Image: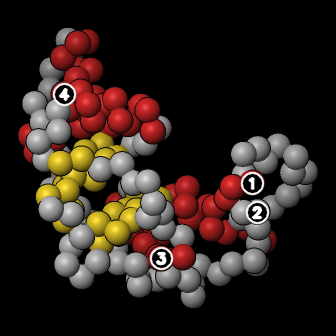
């Protein structure tokens, strides 16, 4: 079985120039954790996730966020004013380097390996650089884990 057999095809996406607040609203409304970022031609240029949104508003550079246990218990993130999501664009928070992607012909076992190795929940599926779908951990669990546990697929 390959990516094209199980991938989600009807995806919500955003543009690098969209407002970050709009992308955050799409993530919340559709209960997604990650949103692919595509250009005018449908080519994947990045992803923006819930984690990226949190990192964007924290007053600490992302590379220094290894451990925030030093913060006092009274520290309140809602009072942050360092960055304002209302004026920011997706390109300011999205990740565009070292993206893990697969082709439509990638074996689902290899996709599962990539997700585990890179600790990611979704893998964009590309055809000639254009986003054509996405495989999530849930898609893989339904195909790989449920049969091993004797759970019937719906």
Instruction: Tell me the SS state at disc 4.
Output: helix
- For the residues labelled 4 and 3, the Cα–Cα distance comes to 34 Å
Q: Earlier in the sequence, mark 4 or mark 2?
A: 2
- Label 4 neighbourhood size at 10 Å, few (<14), some (14-19), many (20+)? some
Q: Earlier in the sequence, mark 3 or mark 1?
A: 1
Residue at the spot of label 1? 64
- For the residues labelled 3 and 1, the Cα–Cα distance comes to 21 Å
Q: Nearer the viewer, residue 103 or 93?
A: 103
Q: Earlier in the sequence, mark 2 or mark 3?
A: 2
Q: Position of residue 65 (x, y in %)?
A: 72, 52
Do the residues bearing badges 1 and 2 touch, measured as CB atoms within 8 Å?
Answer: yes
Q: How many marks?
A: 4
Instruction: Tell me the SS state at disc 1.
Output: helix
Residue at screen point 54% across, 76% down? 92
Q: Earlier in the sequence, mark 1 or mark 4?
A: 1
Image quarter where the N terminus lies is top left
Question: Which quadrant would residue 154 be assigned to in this image?
Answer: top left
Q: In this rendering, which labeled residue sits more in front, label 4 or label 2?
A: 2
Q: Earlier in the sequence, mark 4 or mark 3?
A: 3
Q: In this rendering, which labeled residue sits more in front, label 1 or label 4?
A: 1
Residue at the spot of label 4? 143
Q: Position of residue 134 (x, y in %)?
A: 24, 51
């Amino acid at each position: 079985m390959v990516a094209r057999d199980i991938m989600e095809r009807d995806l919500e996406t955003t543009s690098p120039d969209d407002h970050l607040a709009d992308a955050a609203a799409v993530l919340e409304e559709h209960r997604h954790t990650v949103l692919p970022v595509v250009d005018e031609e449908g080519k994947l240029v990045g992803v923006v996730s819930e984690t990226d949104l949190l990192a964007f508003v924290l007053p600490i550079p992302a590379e220094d966020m290894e451990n925030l246990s030093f913060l006092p218990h009274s520290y309140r993130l809602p009072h942050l004013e360092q960055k304002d999501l209302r004026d920011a664009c997706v390109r300011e928070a999205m990740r565009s380097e070292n993206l893990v992607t697969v082709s439509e012909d990638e074996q689902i076992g290899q996709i599962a390996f990539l997700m585990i190795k890179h600790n990611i929940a979704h893998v964009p599926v590309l055809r000639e650089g254009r986003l054509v779908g996405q495989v999530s951990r849930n898609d893989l669990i339904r195909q790989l884990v449920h049969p091993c546990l004797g759970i019937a697929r719906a």
